[in-house]
Amino acid sequence: MTASATTVRDLAGRGIYVGITAWTEPTLIETGFYPADATTPEERLRYYATQFPITEVDSTYYSPPSERVAKLWVERTPADFVFDIKAFRLLTHHPTPHKSLWRDLRDELPAEVTAARNVYAEKLPPEMLDDALDRFIGALHPLREAGKLGVVLFQFPQYFFPSRTSYAYMEWLADRLEDAGVTGAIEFRQHSWMDGERIERVLEFLRSHGLAYVSVDEPQGFVSSVPPIAAATAGVAIVRFHGRNQDTWQQKGVTAAERFAYDYTEHPGELEEWVPRVSALHEEGRPVHALMNNCYSDYAVKSGQYLAQLLNAEPA
């Protein structure tokens, strides 16, 4: 284990888990982060788990996971490893291609839904949406059984505004997740959720429904920008670091890696701002998940290692 990995592991022993998203990102693989003999997804995950104690799976946003794959994740990681899982896009009100749905569910879609280019949650009969959530959560059973499931992340789009419908949807999610023994985490991409007097109302709503607020570091000044408010509303606190690349934040036609191409280590002081915030989130021993989503090249790896150094230097 490298010195940086030891630092990250020591921090996890205190309950602060630092990791990166997208461990299979091609631009990361090209940097040589993985040993030359780690040429398969299995070998890369096994190696990654020696360097970080947590990751966020983003492939589950694009296509639902299978229980078989979740079982492989369990087998390929240490007993104390943690997976945060990004919710399937259908469940977060994003446009969803028909081909990414479960085949039998796709075959049962109402004619008016089938005729549209994409499927949207609000267009589905309630029982079909119930079924979709059940299937998604059910596939994560191996992770839950092994104690390796962290949170399921619901990242809503910028057109998900504060409204009765939106609150009702999150309340439905909270009820279903509670029944399944799963912690849901909510990330907003619409500034009006965390604007002025509404902030405390939103946080209290999440708190009362057992949903974890996702604190973010991201470019400011956009409709989709949420301020860097550190708040804990559940038994675990989540912070996601997207970088501060103003030029690509809302640029069309770029890959996710290009959008989040930002190396915090080249901007002294920005991660330092989060040290007292993360420490506050960790009060009374609450676990904190700090995920680097600046997933271009090895930027996330370097930024995560640096954040862990800063946090490990703080008094326990």
Image (cartoon, rainbow, N blue to C red):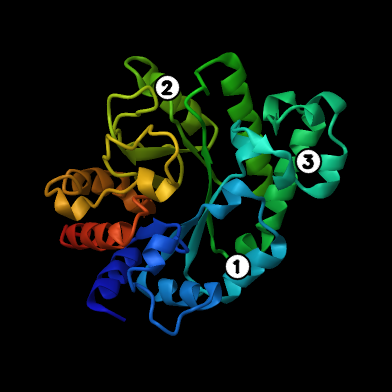
Q: Position of residue 82 (x, y in %)?
A: 48, 62
Picture residue at 34% right of the left edge, 18% below the top: 195
- Distance Cα–Cα, label 2 vs label 1: 35 Å
Q: Which residue is mark 3?
A: 131
Q: Position of residue 269 (x, y in %)?
A: 12, 46
The quarter of the picture where residue 53 lies is bottom left
Q: Is 223 drawn above or below residue 66 in the view shown? A: above
**Does residue 66 appear anywhere in the picture?**
yes
166 to the left or right of 129: left
Name the kind of residue labelled 3 in the image: Asp
Name the kind of residue labelled 1 in the image: Ala
Name the kind of residue labelled 2 in the image: Trp
Q: Which residue is mark 1?
A: 146
Of the two numbered discs 3 and 1 in the rendering, the one whose residue sits closer to the viewer:
3
Q: Which mark is residue 193?
A: 2
111 to the left or right of 4: right
Of the numbered discs 3 and 1, the one sitting upstream in the chain is 3
Q: What is the total number of numbered labels drawn onto the structure image? A: 3
Question: How many C-alpha atoms fall within 10 Å of the one at disc 3: few (<14), some, or many (≥20)?
Answer: few
Q: Which mark is residue 71?
A: none
- Distance Cα–Cα, label 3 vs label 1: 24 Å
Picture residue at 60% right of the left edge, 47% below the top: 62
The quarter of the picture where residue 188 lies is top left
Question: How many C-alpha atoms fall within 10 Å of the one at disc 2: few (<14), some, or many (≥20)?
Answer: many
Q: Position of residue 312 (x, y in %)?
A: 21, 62
Nearest the camera: 111 or 189?
A: 111
279 to the left or right of 170: left
